[in-house]
Image (spheres, rainbow, N blue to C red):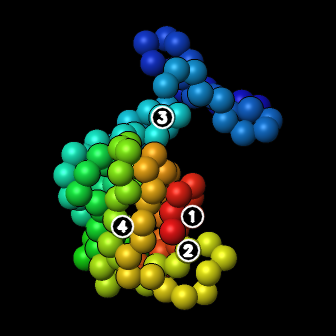
Amino acid sequence: SSVSLKHSGSAKLATTSTGVSITGTCTDSKGDLRNIVQNTQSGAYSLLKSDAGKHISITTGGVTIPSNQNFVAGDAITIINDSGSDQTITCSAVTTYLASDTSSKSSLTLKARGVATFLFVSATVVYGAGAGLE
């Protein structure tokens, strides 16, 4: 049989024969789970552990992927180059690979209006792929 959790008399979470049904908005500490939270930056930016699951919109200054943020396998961050100029992605003491390329990279270029996602497979190894990433 099903189980239902209510708030002020309205069912918000219910079990079903195939899983769970949620009525309303499902959120966590970063916000609505149906929304990829945006972190807008207008200057040089170094990624933070709290950026995992977000997208970074950058217009100038480039982005650094540091090794001191305790990233873990499964952390994913998308970077959007919201400008008409190339942005540099600096890979600081993390081993970074591009999809389909076996050599590690110390820096990458995200072309104008490019978008790239970086997925950590460990605390020190990250893979990047996307439109305009080289």
Of tags 3 and 1, the one toward the viewer is 1
Q: Residue at x 25, y 76 (%)?
A: 68
Q: Quadrant of residue 70?
A: bottom left
Specify which label sits upstream in the sequence, 4 or 1.
4
Q: Are marks 3 and 1 in contact (CB under 8 Å)?
A: no
Left or right of 82 in this view: 75: right
Specify which label sits upstream in the sequence, 3 or 1.
3
Q: CA distance from mark 4 to mark 1?
A: 12 Å
Q: Are marks 2 and 3 in contact (CB under 8 Å)?
A: no
Q: Secondary structure at mark 3?
A: loop
12, above or below 10, in the image: below
Tag 3 residue: 35
Tag 2 residue: 98
Q: Residue at x 43, y 12 (%)?
A: 8
Type of amino acid at the residue the image marks with label 2: Leu
Q: CA distance from mark 1 to mark 2?
A: 6 Å
Tag 4 residue: 89
Left or right of 51 in this view: 22: right
